[in-house]
Every structure is written in C-alpha cells, then in structure tokens.
Amino acid sequence: MLTFNHQNANGAGKTTTIECILGTRKADAGSVSILGLDPRKNRKELFEQVGVQFQEASYSDKIKVWELCEETACLYRKAANYEELLRQFGLWEKRGAFVNELSGGQKQRLFIVLALLVVL
C-alpha cells in the first residue's frame, strides 16, 4: 500500500512513483504489482481496469476533441460513451475544436473524460 502526504514538497517523487506503478516509467530498483499485474509487462491489461488522468499530457496540435476521445476509446475492449461524458463535463459544444484551442480548465475536464473511458 502506498501513502502520500499532500504536503510533500516538489521533487519528492510523487509523480515518478505513480508513473512506476502504472508502468509508464521503469523503476530504478524493486518491483511493482497493481491488481496482481506487473505494470511493465501487463500495461494494456492493467489499463483495461484503471482509468488515469496524467499530470501533463501532450497531444498533436491538430487533433480534435472527438478524435482524441475516439482514439482513446479504441484502447479499451469496452469503453464508456465519450459523447455522454463530453455532455456531462460541459464539453459537447467543443467536440469539433482542436485540443490546443481549449482553455486550461477545458483541457483538464477533457483529460478527466479520457480517464473515465475505461469501463470498470
């Protein structure tokens, strides 16, 4: 079990720890298991069970909101309805906009939508 103190200073390794747990970064030492899976070897299977909102995300400047949702949904055998999630998070009107045209808050809401696409 991992515990994080919300008062940890920058540079304390919180993001690195989460990245190692998710298998998006290789640990320098030790081993990680989440839901009984090795996140480096079983990342696709793990992501079928875990929705993730990364601290920072980098996407093509010329990808539209609906295209990014569609591409992300394709990663899962069964994905949630991204159109409904866009409506719930107030982004339906922005579905045809390029991601780089969204405000900071709209981008954060979009990243939450992407994290919720995994059907638990």
Image (cartoon, rainbow, N blue to C red):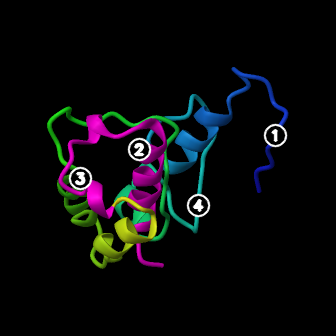
Which SS class for mark 3?
helix
For disc 3, the neighbor class at 10 Å (few under 14, some 14 to 19, many from 20) is: some
Residue of label 2: 107
For marks 4 and 2, give the one nearer the viewer.
2
Residue segment shown in magenta: 92-120
Amino acid tagged 3: Leu
Residue of label 3: 68
Secondary structure mostly taken by the magenta-highlighted segment of the chain: helix
Q: Residue furthest front?
A: 93
**Which of pointers 4 and 2 lies earlier in the amino acid sequence?**
4
Viewer-nearest residue: 58 or 101: 101
**Residue 55 placed where, x, y %?**
52, 38
Q: How far apart are the two marked residues, 4 and 3, measured between alpha carbons?
A: 27 Å
Residue of label 4: 34
**Residue 72 placed where, x, y %?**
27, 58
Label of residue 6 in the image: 1
**Which of pointers 1 and 3 lies earlier in the amino acid sequence?**
1
Viewer-nearest residue: 114 or 13: 114
Amino acid tagged 4: Ile
Q: What is the quadrant of residue 116 in the picture?
A: bottom left
Residue 92 appears anywhere in the view: yes
Can you say whether 8 is above or below 69 in the image? above
